[in-house]
Image (cartoon, grey):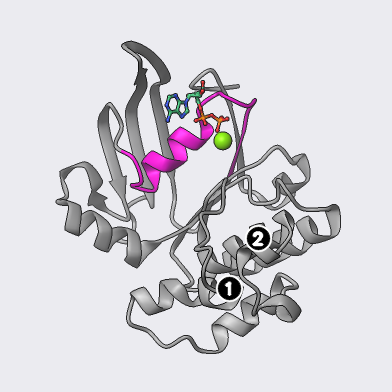
Amino acid sequence: MTDDPMIEARDVYHAYTHAGVTEPVLHGLELVVRRGEFVVIMGPSGCGKTTLLNILGLMACPTRAGTLRLAGEDALGLSDAARTRLRRATLGFVFQRFNLLPTISARQNVALPLRIRGEAADGRVAELLEAVGLQDCADKEPGRLSVGQQQRVAIARALVTRPALLLADEPTGNLDSANAEAVLTLLTEFHRTWRQTILLITHNEHLTVAADRVLRMCDGRFVE
Ligand SMILES: Nc1ncnc2c1ncn2[C@@H]1O[C@H](COP(=O)(O)OP(=O)(O)O)[C@@H](O)[C@H]1O
Ligand SMILES: [Mg+2]
């Protein structure tokens, strides 16, 4: 089983329908990511990167797909409950718009995935807050943090369970170069230490230095 790829997506189509108009955004994508691989996806705004990541992260259902296997499981064949279980057990997700809970502190946001799993909010929370440079504002709610600080909370939250698969949507899009470098160091460390599989969307060419593979996307397709 462990020779299964972490992600096997074949023939993935997606279209949005809005006000009676259907607009296709993914045109039969193929993506296979090995366990422990660090893959970066780049591409212009609007080409379908977030849509793809949401589908791979089981946050959205493709309009149609030949295959969508995640960590060896047939993600399309699962019940809602089984899909949620797979997501909690396997995935860490950094949303492009962070999706932090506004009423609880940064520290509590980072601890949340552990609480949902019924695990203790242990030293991992403080370690990650420090790794992203937020130890001094950990008790503030997201609304009292800068956008860049909120983004770093989202990264710490995605990593706290040491997920086998990290999906990150432009995780340094709001960071200055020093903070982007710290995040890259952190991801590289997780990749090495935990043999974490990483699929990362970015516009930052610098983040490709640590990647095993860089894919370019255009108009809902991978291009050379
Ligand atoms: N919820 C939605 N409803 C309708 N259209 C959408 C929705 N989300 C994205 N789109 C459209 O789908 C295309 C791809 O969007 P997205 O996946 O967010 O691209 P990217 O992340 O590469 O910028 C864009 O044309 C966008 O306008
Ligand atoms: Mg996007």
Mark 2–mark 1 distance (CA, rounded to whole Å): 25 Å
Going 70% across and 74% down the picture, which residue do you hit?
A: 131
Instruction: Say which quadrant the N terminus sits in.
Output: bottom left
Instruction: Say which quadrant the C terminus sits in.
Output: top right
Residue at mark 1: 193
Magenta segment? 40-60
Residue 59 belongs to the span the image colors magenta = yes
Going 39% across and 16% down the picture, which residue do you hit?
A: 24
Q: Is residue 128 above or below residue 102?
A: below
- Secondary element at image label 2: helix
The amino acid at mark 1 is Thr
Q: Is residue 131 above or below residue 158?
A: below
Q: Earlier in the sequence, mark 2 or mark 1?
A: 2
Asked whether 62 or 40 is in front, the reply is 62
Q: Residues within 10 Å of mark 2 (few under 14, many from 20)?
A: many
Cβ of mark 1 under 8 Å from ligand 2: the answer is no
The amino acid at mark 2 is Gln
Residue 93 belongs to the span the image colors magenta = no
